[in-house]
Image (cartoon, rainbow, N blue to C red):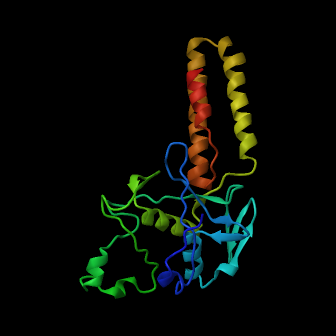
Amino acid sequence: AAIPPIPALGSVAAGIGHLNYPSDVDGGVRTEPLVLRYFDQYIPSLSVMLAARSLNLESKDVKVRLGEGINLGNLKITTDPFLQMHTYFYKDQGGKPAFPVDSFFDVYSGKIPADKYRDKIVLIGATAAGVGTTQVTPVSSAMAPVMILAHSVASILNEHFFVAPTWGFWAEKAVFLAVSLYLILLLPRLKAGMGALVTAALFIALLAAHFGLMAGQGMWLQLMVHAVLLLAG
C-alpha cells in the first residue's frame, strides 16, 4: 500500500516520489527502483524527481522504457529489467564525507548562513547516530536513508551508475562453463606446479575482468562465484 505525505506537505510539494530501497540477499542496499507501478500509475523515485527538478523538468518529462531504463530529459539511465538502477556509491575523500552534512539547528539558528545552500540540492533527514534506521551499503555499514538518497541523486545527474548488460547472463554462464571444463578436463592433466600457475593466472584474470569492467566501463558482470569455484576446484 502507498503511504502518501501528510496533506500540509504533499499539497504544496513541487513533486512527490517514492522512497523504496530493496535489500540484496546479504542485507545491503545496492540498487534503487527508479519507477514503481502502483495500480495503473507509474511513480518515479524521489531521487528521480529531485534530479528532474534540478534540471527544470517535471514528472511528465520522465519517459519510462519498460525493461530497459528511463529517459530524464537528455539523460538516458540504463537499468535492469525491473527498472532498478545499480547506484554508484561515492567514497569519502581525505577524511571528509562525499556529501557535506550540516546540523539543521545550526542553519535554523543562523550559525550557518542559508546562502551556503543557494543553487544547490539540499536534502533534509536524520543522520545522527541512534536516530532513525540505517542501512548497509557498499561504502558504509550504517548509512542514513537521506545519505543513500544523496548518492542516488548524484549517480543520476553525473551518469555514474553500473549497468548489467543484456548479454551479461550468457557471458556469466559461459565463464562458469569454461571454469568447469578447465577443472574437469585440463587441470587433472597438468603437473602440480603448472596447474597452480594456470589456476592463479585464471583467478587473476577473473578478478581483473570483474573490477576492471566495474571501474572502467561501469559494467557489472558477477564473476566472483566463478573465482570461488576455481579456487575450490
Q: In the image, residue 159 lies at what x, y percent? A: 60, 67
Q: Work out whether residue 8 or residue 64 is closer to the camera in this orientation and state it.
A: 8
Judge left or right: residue 94 versus residue 145.
left
Q: Is 33 located above or below residue 120 in the figure?
A: above
Q: Quadrant of the N terminus?
A: bottom right
How many marks can you see? Answer: 0
Please report the residue visible at 55 percent of the width from the left and 73 percent of the height from the top. 4
Q: Horizontal placement of 172 versus 4: left or right?
A: right
In the rendered image, residue 17, in percent from the top left (x then y), is placed at 57, 72
Q: Position of residue 93 (x, y in %)?
A: 37, 61
Q: Identify the residue shown where x is 51% and y is 42%.
A: 26
Q: Is residue 211 above or below residue 75?
A: above
User: Which residue is drawn at the image coordinates 39% and 70% (left, top)?
Assistant: 125
Q: Is residue 219 above or below residue 73?
A: above
Q: Name the image quarter holding residue 116.
A: bottom left
Q: Find residue 174 and report its image quarter.
A: top right
User: Dividing the image into 4 quarters, which one contains the C terminus?
Assistant: top right
142 or 37, which is in the foreground? Answer: 37
Task: Give the residue drawn at x 58%, y 75%.
Answer: 49
Residue 99 image point, x, y percent: 40, 68
